[in-house]
Amino acid sequence: MQRGNLIGLYGGPINSFNPLTAVQGFQAHFFQCVLPPLIQQNVPKTGFVPIMAESWEVSDDATQYTFHIHPGAKWHDGTDFTAEDVVYTYE
């Protein structure tokens, strides 16, 4: 793995580097490039596929989702990706 710069050209400013507040299309695209999601919708939009999550369960009343992260998942700098990282993002 080589370290370097990520340079992007978009049609406007990025107002926030918080992926939870990315409201404009180019902001969402930027975060998709650098912050992979736990899951994402599949191409025919009939369900979801795992990305950073290996699997997930939904409670019977659909109020709790439990995600199991891929073993060995890493951040770009080589540190482990953990459930605590997900919690930190939301808090």
Image (tube, rainbow, N blue to C red):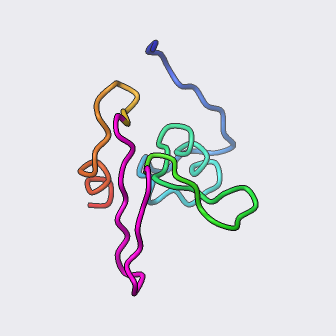
71 magenta-colored:
yes
Q: Which of 6/66 is in front?
A: 66
Left or right of residue 87: residue 69: right
Taking depth in this image into account, of 66 and 85 the one nearest to the observer is 66
User: What is the count of numbered marks?
Assistant: 0
14 vs 4: above or below: below
Quick one: 45 or 27, which is closer to the camera?
45
Task: Identify which residue is drawn at 26% across, 53% down.
Answer: 88
Residue drawn where x is 56% and y is 45% of the image = 32
The x and y percentages for residue 24 are: 61, 57
Q: Name, please, the residue furthest toward the right.
A: 44
Write down the quadrant of residue 61 in the picture: bottom left
Q: Is residue 62 above or below residue 83?
A: below
Left or right: 11 as drawn, with respect to 49: right
Name the residue at 44% across, 15% down. 3
Magenta-drawn stretch contains 40: no
- The image shows residue 89, relative to residue 57, as above or below, that is above
Residue at the outermost bottom position: 61
Residue at 69% of width from left, 43% of height from top?
Answer: 11
Where the N terminus falls, by quadrant? top left
Please determine whether, in this image, residue 77 is positioned above or below residue 14.
above
> In the rendering, at what x and y percent does residue 67 appear?
37, 59
- Looking at the figure, which quarter contains the C terminus? bottom left
> Image quarter for residue 47?
bottom right
Front one among 41 and 7: 41
Please state the extent of the stretch shown in magenta in the rendering.
54-72
Q: Position of residue 68 (x, y in %)?
A: 35, 54
